Amino acid sequence: MECPIQLEAQLAAVNPVSEEEPLQRGKILSLELKIVRVHLDSSIMMDGQLNRIDPDKWRPLIMSFQQFYGLGEQVHASTLSRIPEELYQTADRQHAVTPPNR
């Protein structure tokens, strides 16, 4: 209820970091995840758009340098937003939007 966006992921790989440093070896790991499903609350969706989040409705809290920030007003329009969504969707997207057989 506190988070309007939730991501389901599968662990794809575990990568050790700084293995060449004796004091660091085995203490730091980088986890590679594959997002398999995205859950979005309808209250943040763009009107008339099934797969788009409305940035004016979703106001995420962001931590930057141990301080919390919100989002300000839009600074500049993006030309990327004019690209049809179908052109940059990946082949595995259908799997992510189709509920699994349970």
Image (cartoon, helix red, strand yellow):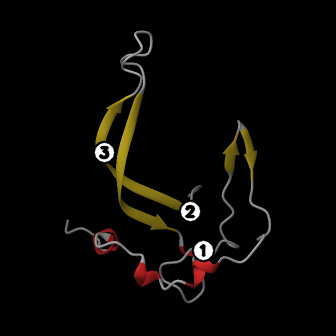
Disc 1 crowd rating (10 Å Cα; few below 14, some 14-19, many 20+) is few
> Residue farthest to the bottom?
48
Q: Three-letter amino acid code at disc 3?
A: Leu
Q: Position of residue 99 (x, y in %)?
A: 29, 71
**Nearer the observer, 60 or 84:** 84
Q: Are marks 2 and 3 in contact (CB under 8 Å)?
A: no
Q: Secondary structure at mark 2?
A: loop
- Quadrant of the drawing holding the N terminus: bottom right
Count of labels in the image:
3
Q: Which residue is mark 2?
A: 4
At x 38%, y 16%, the residue is 25
Residue at the spot of label 1: 43
Asked if the residue under mark 2 is in contact with the one under mark 1, i.e. CB atoms within 8 Å, the reply is yes
In this figure, which residue is indicated by the disc labeled 3? Answer: 11
Chain-order first, disc 1 or disc 3: 3
The type of residue carrying mark 1 is Ser
Rendered view: 6 above or below 78? above
Rendered location of residue 93, percent (x, y): 33, 72
Q: Residue at x 29, y 41 (%)?
A: 13
